[in-house]
Image: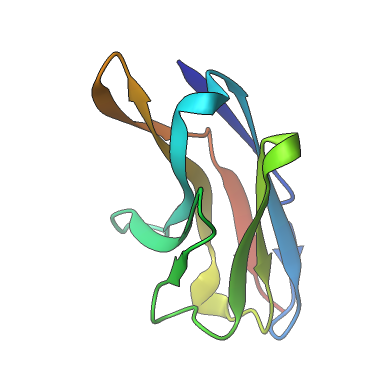
Amino acid sequence: QVTLAESGGGLAQPGGSLRLSCLASGNTASIFTMGWHRQPPEKEPEFVALITENGFTNHADSVRGRFVVSRDSAKHTWYLQMESLRPEDTAVYFCTAKGVDQGHVKQYWGQGTQVTVSS
């Protein structure tokens, strides 16, 4: 089992920056993909970014060039650096992970952290 805990959300002005962190605990050795999703108000959750254990990254078109996902494997932590924030980036951000548990792939979610972009 894996537990994820986000930190770093808050209020930012348009054009501003924030960095989110996700700390994994439990069976962290089972994790092979780490990432972020977000859920804007009254919308379904959407993919934001991922990074694999080999360092491959992918970002949603809506954030590419503004957000960067990275990781510190030794600290079991990954990050989402968000630049040039826009009001439409306002959402609850969830860190996510995929791991193998008893031969099955499991998807893990954190509890979420609010990011609000407003002047």
Percent position (x, y) of residue 7?
Answer: 71, 43
- The residue lying toward the viewer, choosing from 79 and 13, is 79
Percent position (x, y) of residue 61?
Answer: 39, 81
The residue that appears at 74% across and 50% down in the rendered structure is 8
The residue that appears at 49% across and 78% down in the rendered structure is 63
98 to 14, vertically: above or below: above
The residue that appears at 73% across and 60% down in the rendered structure is 19
| Outermost residue toward the left in this view | 104
- The residue lying toward the viewer, choosing from 14 and 63, is 63
Judging from the image, the colouring scheme is: rainbow
- The residue lying toward the viewer, choosing from 56 and 9, is 56
- Asked which quadrant contains residue 66, the reply is bottom right
As drawn, is 10 to the left or to the right of 53?
right
Percent position (x, y) of residue 18?
Answer: 74, 65
- Asked which quadrant contains residue 82, the reply is bottom right
Give the quadrant of the C terminus. Answer: bottom right
- The residue lying toward the viewer, choosing from 12 and 17, is 17
99 to 26, vertically: above or below: below
| Outermost residue toward the front in this view | 54
The residue that appears at 54% across and 66% down in the rendered structure is 90
- Asked which quadrant contains residue 83, the reply is bottom right
19 to 5, vertically: above or below: below
Percent position (x, y) of residue 108?
Answer: 41, 31
As drawn, is 70 to the left or to the right of 3?
right
